[in-house]
Amino acid sequence: MFQKPAVFSLALFAALPVAAQSISQHFDKYSDSCFQRFYSASHLASHPVQKVEAIQLSHFSAESRAMPGSEMTLRIAVRLRGRATWQTPVICSPQGNSLSCGVECDGGRFDVVAKNHSSILITGGTDLYFSDCDAKPRILERAPDDKVFMLHQQPLSNCRP
């Protein structure tokens, strides 16, 4: 599920944010995309209450073609410290310059906004429940250091299920 990029570029962190960038440059119903973040040991040490050590948000257009209007199916995956990777599909709709996303079966929600030309922010929302609607949920409680995540664009091969 999570594949680390072969070459890590500091340029990802050097890009300055651009005001009011449209999320459609990153997520379009008919285009594939992959964003992820691996938190370093030093980052996790400086944020001891952060649970997420890796997070990924991807879109493969084949999964969205049958969706009504501009809705899309994306996939979110998280790996918590010392745990296996959890993943679930989310239904997202454009809302101005952002996407509003929800997990099925009242499994929580979040927003996605463009940070710059190669990065996004997952922000806002509620706790996220990773489960099949009738199964025991695995819960990502989004407080206090698990509320905003900056993810960077990656090759599609890093996000293939």
Image (cartoon, rainbow, N blue to C red):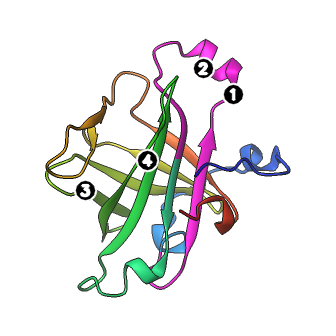
Mark 2 or 4, nearer chain start: 2
Mark 3 or 1, nearer chain start: 1
Q: Residue furthest front?
A: 135
Give residue 131's position: percent from left, percent from top: 26, 46
Place residue 112 in its image quadrant.
bottom left
Q: Amino acid at mark 3?
A: Gly
Which element carries disc 2, helix, strand or loop?
helix
Give residue 23's position: percent from left, percent from top: 47, 67
Q: Amino acid at mark 1?
A: Ser
Which element carries disc 3, helix, strand or loop?
strand
* Range drawn in magenta: 28-55
Determine the residue positioned at 57% across, 69% down: 33
Give residue 50's position: percent from left, percent from top: 47, 22
Number of numbered labels in the structure image: 4
What residue is disc 2 on?
44
Q: From where the camera sits, is residue 118 visible?
A: yes
- Residue 38 lies in the magenta-colored region: yes
Rendered view: 152 above or below 54:
below
What residue is disc 3 on?
102
Q: Amino acid at mark 4?
A: Ile
Mark 4 or 1, nearer chain start: 1
Place residue 45 in its image quadrant.
top right
Q: CA distance from mark 2 to mark 4?
A: 18 Å
What residue is disc 4 on?
122
Q: Nearer the viewer, residue 57 or 135?
A: 135
Q: Are marks 2 and 1 in contact (CB under 8 Å)?
A: yes
Q: CA distance from mark 2 to mark 1?
A: 6 Å
- Tell me the number on the disc at residue 40: 1
